[in-house]
Image (cartoon, rainbow, N blue to C red):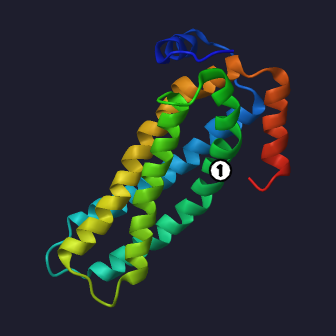
Amino acid sequence: MGNISHCDLYKRAMQSDSQLCIALQQLKDEHEPLRKQMKEIDKLAQKVTLLPPFEDRVTHIRTLHKKVLEFEKVLTPHAEREEGLLFPMMVKYVGYGGGPIAVMEFEHNQAKGYLDLFLEQAEKMGETIDESFSKEMASNVIKVCYVLSDHFLKEEEVLFPNAQQLLNEEEKELLYFQFHHKNY
């Protein structure tokens, strides 16, 4: 099957009222706990940006760091299932260059970049931290949440419904099998 345009993908997704296969439903279901964690870390990060000038920032950043590490433990296998299994299956139907899979991967990389930057900054943090650096760190977490909130919506409204329509039954079964029998 050749490349399908963005407009065609959106139209298909809007016309689709079918249930998702087990593997795609699993990916979709994984978003809700991730959203709950994102809401928590976003709230903590927002709080850091609003701290008064002489407030102890280290304690707040350490709390945020701990929560971000917990979030990353859940996010990483989810992203690996998409990048390592679903996206390659979809490429054969929708192509790659400039298409929806390229966009999905770009957003994964963007969120991961902000996440890694925050984690790197947190590891280098000493016993004190100045206001501007704490705000920069918190800003990276806020950006992760922003990128992924939009990203999850695109997956749920367009990518997953299109995958449901485009992938054949054998591919859907293979996707499920690989989710549960590989290190994803």
Q: Quadrant of the N terminus?
A: top right
Q: Amino acid at mark 1?
A: Glu
Q: Position of residue 36 (x, y in %)?
A: 50, 50
Side (left or right) of 109 relative to 61: right
Determine if residue 13 is in view.
yes
**Label 1 crowding class (10 Å Cα cut-off): few <14, some 14-19, many 20+?**
some
From what the image shows, is residue 15 above or below residue 68?
A: above
Residue drawn at the location 43% of the way across and 58% of the way down:
113
Q: Position of residue 144 (x, y in %)?
A: 40, 53
Side (left or right) of 134 relative to 11: left
The answer to which of 89 and 49 lies nearer the viewer is: 89
From what the image shows, is residue 22 above or below residue 2?
A: below
> In the rendered image, which quarter is residue 155 located in?
top right
The answer to which of 60 and 172 lies nearer the viewer is: 172
From what the image shows, is residue 87 above or below residue 92?
A: below
Residue drawn at the location 81% of the way across and 44% of the way down:
178
Secondary element under disc 1, as helix, strand or loop, is helix
> In the rendered image, which quarter is residue 175 located in?
top right
Q: Position of residue 160 (x, y in %)?
A: 62, 27
> In the rendered image, which quarter is residue 118 located in?
bottom left
From what the image shows, is residue 124 above or below residue 83?
A: below
**Residue underneath mark 1:** 80
The answer to which of 42 and 102 lies nearer the viewer is: 102
